[in-house]
Amino acid sequence: MQEKFDDRPIGVFDSGQGGLTVLSRLVDLMPNEDYVFYGDSAHAPYGVKTPEEVYQLTKQVIDELIKKDHVKAVMIACNTATSVAADRLRREYDLPIIGIEPAVKPAVQENAGTVVAMATPLTLKAPKFNDLAAKYAKKDQVVKVPAPKLVELVEDGQMDTPAVYDYLHGLLDPYAGQTDGVVLGCTHFPFAKKAIKNILGPKTKVYDGAIGAAEEVKRQLAKRGELTDRTEPGEISFKNSKPGAGKLSQKLFQIYRQDCQ
Ligand code: DGL
């Protein structure tokens, strides 16, 4: 088969700034691709909306990424949107739509004791999360910890401020020193990884689905012959539905790559 190449950008979408944690893994894995990051901060948080609202918002962004940015694939870098909308959207579009899911499987397979799963309320209620836990975890091994306010704090650019610590202490103190692993089942949460580890204890292993999701994007594009053949680093554009938030994305992306990953 003759190889073909494709220089169109990859669209990376989240309800807000969280998807930057996935974008970072994509750039590590495929540095020569172009990316358009779209944060829907005007409508964040998604994790307290209905599944239908999340589906409609996600669809609007995918339409824009296709029409205006001519993307060749969309990474839904949002566990919440993946949980409630990805299957339906895949049936409606021809281009690859890749999602991210909470890394429950490795966390429960690599740890015998309790695993804390932090995510949005909607992700923790959705069948995707509960099916994963039922399939791989022992009974009562996974403790669900919804953390919707952490999304708002990260949207505000906070990751290790007193407000972040206050909120996380309230949620996580009961599990400090008692848990082997923590699943960060929302793409905003890796921004607060240091604070989460400081509270749960240095031995707690942290799991998120970003590397697996980035690898899946690469696999799907390779299969279609649509990876770029450029040898220079690609470009990243940051778009956001909330005025000014695209600039914040750019800044948070640098901070994440330098200090948090
Ligand atoms: N970052 C998103 C996730 O991975 C959603 C956060 C939100 O908007 O509630 O679930």
Image (cartoon, rainbow, N blue to C red):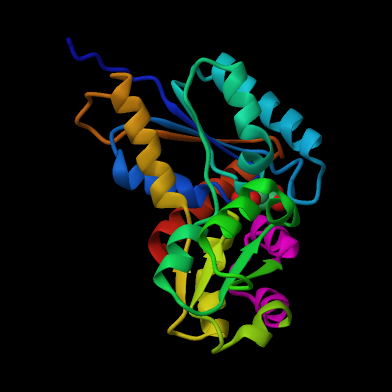
Q: Residue at x 66, y 86 (%)?
A: 173
List x then y, in percent, for residue 172.
66, 80
Q: Residue at x 55, y 18 (%)?
A: 66
Examine the rendered structure and indicate whether residue 189 appears above or below residue 128. below
Question: Which SS does the magenta portion mostly show?
Answer: helix
Q: Nearer the viewer, residue 153 or 83?
A: 83
The magenta segment is 146-169
List x then y, in percent, for residue 71.
47, 21
Question: Left of 179 or right of it: where is 219?
Answer: left
The answer to whether residue 227 is seen in the rendering is: no
Q: Residue at x 17, y 10 (%)?
A: 2
The answer to whether residue 59 is seen in the rendering is: yes
List x then y, in percent, for residue 161.
63, 75
Q: Quadrant of the N terminus?
A: top left
Q: Nearer the viewer, residue 114 or 155?
A: 114
List x then y, in percent, for residue 86.
61, 33
